[in-house]
Image (cartoon, rainbow, N blue to C red):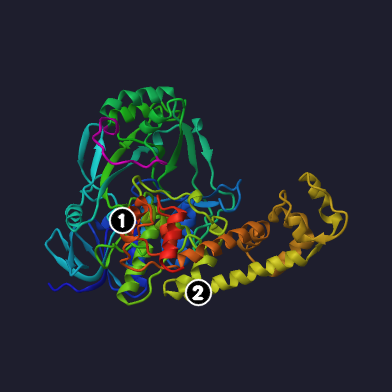
Amino acid sequence: MIYPNYDVIVVGAGHAGCEAAASAANMGSKVLLITMNMQTIAQMSCNPAMGGIAKGQIVREIDALGGYSGIVSDKSAIQFRMLNRSKGPAMWSPRTQNDRMLFAAEWRKKLEETTNIDFWQDMANGIIVEDGRAVGVTTGMGISFRSKSVILTNGTFLNGIIHIGEKQFGGGRTGEKAATGITEQLVGLGFESGRMKTGTPARIDGRSLNYSKMEEQFGDENPDKFSYSDTPYLTKQRSCWITYTNQAVHDILQEGFEKSPMFTGRIQGLGPRYCPSIEDKINRFSDRERHQLFVEPEGWDTCEIYVNGFSSSLPEDIQYRAMRKIEGFENVKMFRPGYAIEYDYFPPTQLSSTLETKLISGLYFAGQINGTTGYEEAACQGLMAGINAHRKINDLTPVVLSRSEAYIGVLIDDLITKGTEEPYRMFTSRAEFRTLLRQDNADIRLTPLGHEIGLATEESYNRVKSKVVDIQRVMDLIANLSIDPSEVNPWLNTLATGELNQRVKAKSILLRPQVGIVDFINASATLKSAIESLQVDRLVIESAEINFKYEGYIGREQELVDKMSRLEYVKLKEGFDFSQVSSLSTEARQKLSAIRPSTLGQAARISGVTPSDISVLLVHMGR
């Protein structure tokens, strides 16, 4: 059999691999997606949910650029919640609870509908490297596939080891074997590798739970969605539930500490700081009497439950006994125990801003191989790796998102300039410009770019242009419409804010901290009639309100972006020898030589590089 040559080969069909394959293929590249199991494409290996704090913004950004994660999430959602509504709009973060099986099925359907993607079920065990360039992969069957570029999205499979108490066995996910060969080859080529750890809770039988002892967690009354396209809104939702551990649970778990691979040293890799195992929680926070658990259904038509917050690598009998002491879990039945998994990763400072490796041209890393954790973080890396692999082989300029353009830009910049020694998770606090990077304006920020590079559709681009016009129409109306005191004073009194003494513009009322635009519209017949005449949707109205209320903050952040961007455009010459700049501190010379930033802006964000070091570089460059 003669195998075709490809433009891009993607190794791994998790969230990063799926977005990488889809983006490269939709831009015109001929793509081969290699996976060890065609039945687990886009599997939600951990919790059946998408989005959350900052992660929801990333899903919206992927959608705005033309990726598929938002569409697939909407089509498989069983609940939608906008988190952090009590805080400012920069903190609002969309999240869906998803049907695990439907999510994977929708992703596979999207990929199979993409004519430029071929599939191959096999283990990729080596990269074909010629003259310092990746030109294909070899597989366990002894087959060689040739390509112009390769994207590795191996997830937790590289030399993966699963731990349950004192038991350990090779695997990249429960019931699936680990991937071997690639780490050893890359280390031989000069790459640095490390070990990381993550974990997952037990899966249990929802029919065995007593929900009357738990707190019900409903979805939003008027659920939103991720995608800016015409995906459906939820018309019905499934509830989640909240319960708590207690001292009896903690006492039983502590019995297993002597057999815990975390505490006996059998696990060498660092686990995720912000999603610790239950044994790690009760060890680190011994003063806490209880820990919150989220009881999450795995889909519309299954009794399987995911116990969010009870990740564990303790012996299965300890896990089971402890669970039965949780309120509502007295008669729990377990489908399978939780486990920890340890795997290889490659410190991401070995990558350029396009996610291409510095050592091997045409070789890209995306997802957990770079030390990140989370579906969303993986998916956005896959998207950007696919975009840049396609553009490189077509001699097009790379696409690099700045920290002021997208959370995706923050994530990639953090990885390549700071690296990570523990699983990296995105938070809104990691972004300097989060008022600019809101979930409601991701399409305005990024769809024009997605359209320009041939990924976002013409329909998406036109939709964004119309949205921008509609937001301005709403803002103009509110700025110019006068409101009579008699119409709104009774309502203003209920908000404990001052009455009007004369007619004023609607904008001045809206700017009061107590006033929300939805309630204002309902309180003022004049405003309601005027808004209805514009025939715009509620998301446009919401965006107009945010623009008004946060105009000052947005303006100040934009001024700061303009100042900082001056360094971003100062390119450092490729091959620049930092070791020869004697005025730099020793630490700066070491860090700059190791990471090799491409701009002064990147250099300034490297730990250990001081403002005086940047000044030295500016002088050295004649600035």
- Quadrant of the rendered structure where residue 161 is? top left
| Mark 1 lies on residue | 594
Q: Is residue 35 left or right of residue 433?
A: left
Name of the residue lying farthest toward the front: 582
Q: Which mark is residue 459?
A: 2
Q: Position of residue 486 (x, y in %)?
A: 86, 55
Q: Nearer the viewer, residue 166 or 611?
A: 611
Q: Nearer the viewer, residue 234 or 371?
A: 371
Q: Is residue 98 left or right of residue 475?
A: left
Placement of 52 over or under 213, stated as above or below: below
- Which span is picked out in magenta? 261-275
Residue 263 among those drawn in magenta: yes
- Quadrant of the rendered structure where residue 278 is? top left
Q: Is residue 148 left or right of residue 63?
A: left
- Which quadrant holds the N terminus? bottom left
Amino acid type at image mark 2: Glu
Q: Position of residue 506 (x, y in %)?
A: 77, 60
Residue 469: tell me if it is visible.
yes
Residue 74: tell me if it is visible.
no
Q: Nearer the viewer, residue 268 or 95?
A: 268
Badge 1 crowding class, 10 Å Cα cut-off, few under 14, some 14 to 19, many 20 or more, is few
Q: Of label 2 and label 1, which has the lower sequence position?
A: 2
Amino acid type at image mark 1: Ala
Q: Nearer the viewer, residue 427 or 458?
A: 427
Residue 584 among those drawn in magenta: no
Residue at 16% from the left image edge and 61% from the top image edge = 139
